Amino acid sequence: MEDKLRHPIDRSSSLKALVIHEELIQKQMIIDSIKKVLAQLNQIEKDYIKWRYFEEKSVVATSMELGYSEKYIFQLRKKVLDKLLIPLSGLLVM
């Protein structure tokens, strides 16, 4: 009994730890969902995402880099977004 009195439970730290734990679980779910969706993309789709979004290239530069017409790049964009939006839309409510 004396031990509990000398070391009171810090409830605010416990609550903070619980909140952090729940945030980590949510973030891991997001990462897992993104990995799953990316695994379903073919190499051209992955290359499109790399050049257009990570390298921040224009549509023209992306089409030149990938060797496809701008028209095809726009079609590819729609195809990729359709693949990404449906599975990842459930994450928006988190």
Image (tube, helix red, strand yellow):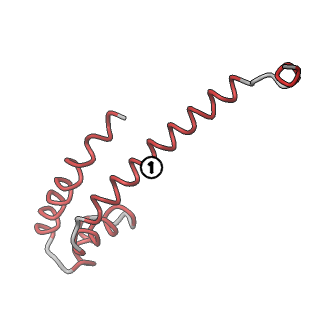
- Amino acid of disc 1: Gln
- In the rendered image, residue 83, in percent from the top left (x then y), is placed at 19, 56
The answer to which image quadrant residue 54 occupies is bottom left
| Front one among 86 and 53 | 86
Give the x, y percent position of residue 55.
Answer: 39, 67
Could you say where residue 6 lies in the image, as x and y percent from the top left?
Answer: 88, 23
**21 relative to 66 in the view: left or right:** right
Q: Residue 80 is drawn in which quadrant? A: bottom left
SS of the residue under disc 1: helix
Query: In the visual, does 70 lie left or right of 51?
Result: left
Q: Residue at x 68, y 24 (%)?
A: 12
Residue occupied by mark 1:
28
Residue 18: percent from left, percent from top: 58, 32
Instruction: Assign the N terminus to one quadrant of the image.
Output: top right
Judge whether 10 appears above or below 51 on screen: above
Question: What residue appears at the point 63 percent right and 30 percent down from the top-left corner?
Answer: 16
